[in-house]
Amino acid sequence: MELKTGAAESTLDDKGRVSIPVRFRECFQGELVITWGSERCAWIMTSAVWERFERSIRNSQVLNPKQRRDLEKKHLEEANEVELDKAGRIAIPPRIRKYANLTKDCLVIRSEDRLYIWDVATRDADIAKNDPETLEAFNLINDQEYLRAD
């Protein structure tokens, strides 16, 4: 089984680079795009995922013009091309570091199609703030068939 999600601790170095865990590197090679995440984190996507994401914003039939413009400002206009260096690090642009409040201790999280780079303290605060809603959501799915023991 290939785990398509997961998290690993990392460190932001003095030059603003974050080491990407070895287990995530295979899927995030070549030209990558980094931008502001929807929360206070950075998103890293492959160019193919980025192109789909960009098209979904620009061609959306469900967004009104203000929503489209807001998403363009936050995600599309803040995007930068990046690549893993030989040591498996990605340089996080200063503006994205500031937005995501990235300090020394970081968390690299892989979802199926992107990486999230979080400041550990920011992520912990976000989880604590949303914990009651998360628990409620978990309780809603807890009765689902796939969560029941055999």
Image: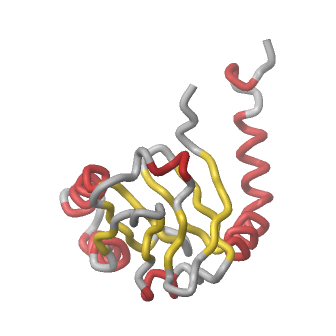
Residue 15 horizontal/vertical position (percent): 50, 85
Residue appearing at x 32%, y 65% in the figure: 33
**Relative to the observer, which residue lies in front, 91 or 37?**
91
Residue appearing at x 33%, y 79% in the figure: 78
Residue 54 horizontal/vertical position (percent): 25, 61
Residue 127 horizontal/vertical position (percent): 73, 64
The image quadrant of residue 102 is bottom right
The image quadrant of residue 145 is top right
Residue appearing at x 52%, y 60% in the figure: 20
Quadrant where the N terminus sits is: top right
Residue 25 horizontal/vertical position (percent): 46, 51
Residue appearing at x 24%, y 72% in the figure: 65
Side of 50 relative to 123 (left or right): left
**Relative to the observer, which residue lies in front, 68 or 110?**
110
Side of 95 relative to 64 (left or right): right
Question: Does residue 64 sit above or below 56 in this rendering?
Answer: below
Among all residues in the image, which is located at the extreme front? 86
Quadrant where the C terminus sits is: top right
